[in-house]
Amino acid sequence: MKAMNLKELSRVLGLSQTTVSRALNGYPEVSEATRRRVREAALRHDYSPNTRAKGLATGRTMTIGQVVPLSTAHQMMNPIFADFAVGFGEALARKGYELVTAIVPEEQEAQVYRSFRARGSVDGVIVHGPRVHDPRLALLDELGLPYVVHGRATEHGAPYAWVDVDNRTAFARATDHLMDLGHARIALINGPEHLDFAHRRRDGYARALAARGIAVDPAQMHAVEMTELNGHAAMQELLALPQRPTAVLAASIILALGIRRAIEEAGLVMGRDVSVAIHDDVLSFLQNAGDRPVFTATRSSIRDAGALLCGMLLERIDAPATPPPSRLLQAELILGQSTGPAPTLTPQG
Amino acid sequence: MKAMNLKELSRVLGLSQTTVSRALNGYPEVSEATRRRVREAALRHDYSPNTRAKGLATGRTMTIGQVVPLSTAHQMMNPIFADFAVGFGEALARKGYELVTAIVPEEQEAQVYRSFRARGSVDGVIVHGPRVHDPRLALLDELGLPYVVHGRATEHGAPYAWVDVDNRTAFARATDHLMDLGHARIALINGPEHLDFAHRRRDGYARALAARGIAVDPAQMHAVEMTELNGHAAMQELLALPQRPTAVLAASIILALGIRRAIEEAGLVMGRDVSVAIHDDVLSFLQNAGDRPVFTATRSSIRDAGALLCGMLLERIDAPATPPPSRLLQAELILGQSTGPAPTLTPQG
DNA sequence: ATCGGACACCAAAGCGCTTTGGGCTGCGCC
DNA sequence: GGCGCAGCCCAAAGCGCTTTGGTGTCCGAT
């Protein structure tokens, strides 16, 4: 069963391909009566224009590319990617675009962008997990491939389109909140700090401490890939410290799961013996919700960021010459059960 | 900067498009010397054949489609999808295929398959989260679109290609294990039971109980979408029961996170007061690993299933006439800290 | 010397669409 | 009556590739 095509449809209708094409694409040169007749026939015969042929003829592919690098780092990204992709992908589908995902070893990522360009398979791409210095942006600039970045790449010279959470402010606020509760020894369990967001989070944390004259202690800072196991291990190390922290700031709710486990295994109570504040991406399967959520958190929906970036990317594609837009989202601080006043008698010290 | 194309490349080389095309595609009608010269030039000029043009000419699109339905159910699927997609997508990329993902409201899923077919945008599709009776398979059969199913659709009449974990056996084994430990009141916190895998899991659980003469108690069975919050709520209900369970079987590690939280909030100890056994999909960000993993689990890697299904789908595309293959994977039972002997004095009862 | 057949290459058609550059009516107007 | 002008519609070119059906050359065999 071959799919219906333009030629066949126009033959059935007794019209030229030109007219049928124009009728379906809303050109004014065709009478309303004919247009209706054509539309109806297209529907009846289940006709949709062949994507490839249309792309060839128009030069537009109506697809957006994204590459998910396979690497140790993918572990942290997967669940976050997934929710981001839902926000992004839904908005994209609504506009009639398709989303192609390349899952390749990290070192092949540049190659994929090159091939996207050379084979003309996408109209634009979305860049995930930007690093502080990220060569991908320069490459995309060079290739002339429209792109938007989820996050920022601090050291990239040229302007580019991005949407980011104000990580610095968020972590400074969370740190302030903990200090307001009387905590002075606050640990940080961060994501990998070559990633821009983690870099900024540490910065916000460090600045807030410095502003109150508290020295940052390298022993209180961990930077690990954001898995439950890593959160657990990092927290165990922190608890074994002679000067163990009374509060912990964690870069993700997934880390926090492991952190909580370590706290409980040590016979301590989260929110009483050790306070925990996290950044919450509002993952669909791990909601930190309710009147009094489990975790005190700086919250910003990654799904919303996805939808926002989608709109931005399509704009860039339509008007590549305009200066690239950007958007800094503020995270809200929500108070949960995982934080409380600093213990008055710090144990062991 | 326009991308290099065949015409231009052949002009540069002083050869016909035919010869260049044949040289690159490995046809024998071209001398080795010429082939080398062409290959080298293609590399040097960053030439890759335009995907759409190639697709138009060959009728093969070299892309696989998947649709991720946006619905309440997506919440449970996201993180699992993500890891599956890594396994599938990596294998796919290795074969030179692309993966397009449509993220649409559930009720549009059929429409997407129709449009995949009508617009000729994919060579095949992968079907996620099959239901006990799943109309999608009949639709795909009718459309003549090659597909493979991750899981099974019990009531689908015709043969189809699938890879599934032996859910029934896995849950029967886990139930047996709990009974061997002396548990008699074993609850089930399952996924939504219109989904085939959840249906089979309940069946395995029920059969194992029945085999030892234990009646299944509807009050001890929950079927919810697999989020942390739902696991927590279901466990709270179970703990409030006059006859509360001494052990719980959970369909996912994500549910188990909420289950553990409810147990601890009730002042109980998991593995001592309440045993928990789960099914573990080996999610990258939530590993249940180590000598003595946190959770006793039936384990089967969803990533591996993805890679397996990829190979299967490509085979179906190449040889649509062969009888559809299938593969039933056995989950291994691993013992963790979350299970222990049934308390000798059951509290409250 | 002629022929058959590898061997190496090529021109042109065709994949299914959009779009350019018309053509043909029928109308109102001078 | 002729002209201009909408209003509708069409034939054909072109997007970048593969593939069919060749052509021309060179060589060994007859």
Image (cartoon, coloured by chain):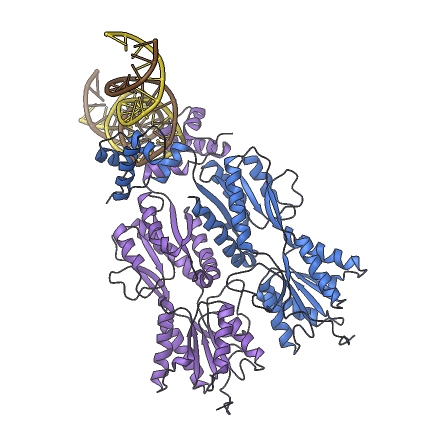
Chain colours: A purple, B blue, C yellow, D brown
Q: Residue at 33% across / 32% down in the picture?
A: B22
- Quarter of the image for the C terminus of chain B: give it: bottom right
Can you say whether A29 is above or below A338 in the image?
A: above
Numbered marks: total = 0
Q: Is residue B191 visible?
A: no
Location of residue A314 with respect to D24 vertically, above or below: below
- Is A184 placed above or below B165 here? below
Question: In this orientation, does residue A308 appear?
Answer: yes
Q: Position of residue B330 (x, y in %)?
A: 63, 53
Residue B321 image offset from top left, x and y in percent: 56, 32
Quarter residue A174 falls in: bottom left
Tell whether B342 sits left or right of B318. Answer: right
Residue at 54 percent of width and 53 percent of height: B304
Q: Is residue A146 above or below residue D24?
A: below
The picture places residue A170, in percent across and down from the top left corner, at 40, 74
State which quarter of the image contains the N terminus of chain B. Answer: top left
Q: Find residue A121 and report its image quarter.
A: top left
Give whichever of B209, A81 is nearer the camera.
Answer: B209
Asked which quadrant contains residue D3, the reply is top left
Instruction: Residue lying at the far right in this picture: please name it.
Output: B213
Considering depth in this image, is A243 or A90 the residue closer to the camera?
Answer: A243
Q: Position of residue A1 (x, y in %)?
A: 51, 29
| Residue plotted at (63% across, 76% down) | B264
